[in-house]
Image (cartoon, rainbow, N blue to C red):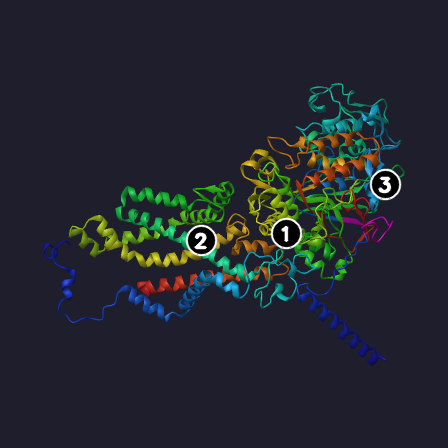
Amino acid sequence: MMRITRKRAAVALAAVAALGLSACGSSSDGGGGGGAPKLDNSAIGSVASPSDAKGGTLKFGLAGEWGDTVDPGETYYGYSWDMLRNYARTLVVFKSEPGKAGLELTPDLAEDLGKSSDGGKTWTYTLKPGLKFEDGSPITSKDVKYAVLRSTDKKTFPNGPAYFEGMLNLPKGYDGPYRSKGMNTDSAIETPDDSTIVFHLKTPFAGFDYLAQLPQTAPVPQAKDTGAKYKNHVISSGPYMFQGNYNPTTGFTLVRNPNWDASTDPNRKALPDQMTVKVNMAPDDVDNQIIAGTLDVDIAGTGVQPAALTKVLKDQTLMNRADNPTIARLWYTSINPTVKPFDNIECRKAVEYGMSPRLYQNAYGGKFAGGEIASTVMPPMIPGYQDFDLYGVKDNPGGQEAKAKEALKACGQEGGFETTMGYRDDRPKEKATAEAFQQSLGKIGIKVTPKALPSGDYFSATCGLPSYVVKNNLGLCANGWGADWNDGYGFLSQIVDSRVIRETGGSSNTSVRIPEVDKMIDQATVEQDQAKRDELWGQIDKRVMEEAVIYPGVYAKSVLLRSKNTTNVFVNEAWGYYDYTAMGVKQ
Amino acid sequence: MEDPSLSHADPEAVLVGEKQIEGRSLSQIAWGKLRRDKVALAGGAFIVFLILVAILAPLIVKITGGPPNAYHEDLLSPYIPNIPAGDFGGMSWRHPMGLETVSGRDIFSRVLYGARISLLIAILATMLSVAIGTTVGIIAGFFGGWVDAILSRIMDMFLAFPLLVFAIALSGVFPDKAFGFSGLPLRLGLLIFVIGFFNWPYIGRIVRGQTISLREREYVEAARSLGARRPYILFTELLPNLLAPILVYSTLIIPTNILFEAALSFLGVGIPPPTASWGGMLADAVTFYTVPHFMFWPGLAIFATVLAFNLFGDGLRDAFDPRGR
């Protein structure tokens, strides 16, 4: 018996060794052979390892310092917003569900979504009963009003979103609750009772519910507010609260909030007993610790580093806990019509045809970590997305030399011309993109000179400054955009509206100046019917592409890795990475 | 010292009429020693080889490798993003060192063309340093006094300069067009200037020291007492004797300059893309460090070149060193 077992063991060992050898063989050929890697992807559109088991510690890691702040009035990073929902509740919130449902809004503090009157100028919300802060005091509509008002103070919170002060009908000269003490702000926000809050806007805005989901509507008790120092200990309204203080250089720990009532909150599962966030790690260290299981998630949500990517794509056990979501982010290149000869649409079209989409994709890291070849400005998951491909980029990944040359001829530039392409000097992917343009367009006679520009003032002093663009012959500028929230307004309004271009610089839009599009945006902004509104944004997208002022590049994708301990994992489409309110850990 | 009976004597006259002794000049002695130093000779041979390869690069890549900036995206793995298909970074007869990540450019061609950039910048920058350093060093050493004091302080100032930081800043603010140049030639000029202009004090100090020791030698005294003018003493009496140390230190500065250029290109402020340079290739390869084939070849090129120059320079120094006679 014993001998046979031994023999069997030996056979088994030999088989394992053979497997190991073949694995080595396939990995040593540099990834050429093997076959297409199969990423698990079960956390996209569905829940990976679903579970309702509570307890344990969910461990987050972050490369570098915490990007912005945890103060709901000022935070502006995607992962901050994803994480914030664990310690703060807003009037409405994106559904904590996999798939398209994640893009839908659902009431959180409020009983229902906003009710508009006055043609979209007035929005009313009613709070649920029994809501409490971490100290047990009740949450009232006045706390929400105070939170929104303090967030409009850009001297105290310079980096937060600026939608509320732009849209609310605030009294003239209002300078936030700290400096304009006692000023009557009922013209902007009314609180007729402790559970009702009414917003008054300057002009109608049909998508106000998207503003009501901003972290800025998370209630802040005025008595506990310490202004810029409030971030040290944000008073929780959600299922978790800060243990001690938040420190941007060392991280923080969240523990259960005893005063959170699950019956008021059907949207959050709150599985782990504790969440820890370790910051200031080396980027590759984060990946390696997730592979090893000493960390659970990279909170930044941008995907693994190139080093870990090659590791993951060669190892099926790692691929079994990797997901490859498409993110609502477009990596694109502005074709500036202010720079000659791009004032002629045919010359712009020559770029659309001549550039090789595959080289663009390669520059961003290929089809897994880089993205999908894009033919529109809006990525597919944005409501209103229309699937069109005006320049046939998807069918011609190598570019279309012949058509590009025709366009050049029509433009009167048969012999080609010279132009410069700007990119941010600390972004190797943008550098690779500029080189790809140089390579592709060189074939049709357009000589592109890549120009590295300082990242810090890319939009304020170089690529976003119209006079600099013209003076330096910057015909092309590498660019990228992700929305504050995923609808047509959130995605398009800042990058295709010509009125956001400032002659003094600072806008992400550098090339789209189409009066017709501006009119269409105004129309879509006030359209109350969501289906019609989405349709309008799709048309705007198409109109922009017809003018060939944007080369769409790629819809970003990332390779996300979760540790073997995580449960109940799914990608929330509102962020494009894991939903941090839903995850749990195995005990 | 100044014996009047000797003041009009021809120093060479002593030898006239005597039997010729096997007189060997300093350079003859040095060459004899260098010839026996196999390690230094190997370094020298590699340098010659490298210069030939750099000059002939356009011909060599016709045989294998192809144009250095041509993309081969079709040879990248369809599955593992940005990594060339095939063993060892896509090695083949057509691409003997494999292909770069992301673009699929031929590494062999780019290493060859990178040698042109590296050598051009390093050698020209060294010449600039030597020209300035020698001039200032001789003047400081020969004249002494307040001239020496001022020039020496200036050298100290240059030595204290945070060169790397300055180079990064200058590359950032420098315009695209200047002095009638633009693009690559302008960048090359800028790099040569930055590297050469800020390194001259190293040569300057050595030349100054040598000059001070030489100017008190008897033959200089003799020339001076014979009424030789300063330029004559400087160029005819001093400079030939300074050539040896200048040559030795030039050979040792070149590898430092190669490394400095590579560092600047690595940091993205050196040679603009897509022109091949070793530092730039390393920068592209570093995000793929788990597949080390791509940093191996440019890394090896830098390593071998710097080592060759150092070995040759050390050999040269030993050969000229009178104590080692």
Range shown magenta: A43-58
Q: Quadrant of residue B93?
A: bottom right
- The residue tagged with tag 1: helix, strand or loop? helix
Indicate which label's residue lies in the foreground, 2 or 1: 1
Residue A170 to residue A506: above or below: above
The span from disc 2 to disc 1 (Cα, nearest Å) is 37 Å
Residue kind at label 3, given as amino acid type: Asn
Q: Label 2: how many residues lie within 10 Å, few (<14), some (14-19) or many (20+)?
A: many
Between residue A148 and residue A557, name the one nearer to us: A557
- Residue A223 seen by the camera: no
Between residue A157 and residue A369, name the one nearer to us: A369
Would residue A214 appear left or right of A365 to someone viewing this image? right
- The residue tagged with tag 2: helix, strand or loop? helix
Q: Residue at 59% across / 44% down in the picture?
A: A423
* A55 falls in the magenta region: yes
The image position of residue A60, as x and y in percent, is 73, 48
Residue kind at label 2, given as amino acid type: Ile
State the quadrant of the N terminus of chain A: bottom right
Disc 2: which residue: B121
Would residue A130 appear left or right of A495 to someone viewing this image? right
In the rendered structure, find residue A401 and report the number of the disc placed on it. 1
- Residue A456 seen by the camera: yes
What count of labels does the image hold?
3
Residue kind at label 1, given as amino acid type: Glu
Q: Chain of mark 2?
A: B
* B222 falls in the magenta region: no
The image position of residue B268, as x and y in percent, is 54, 49
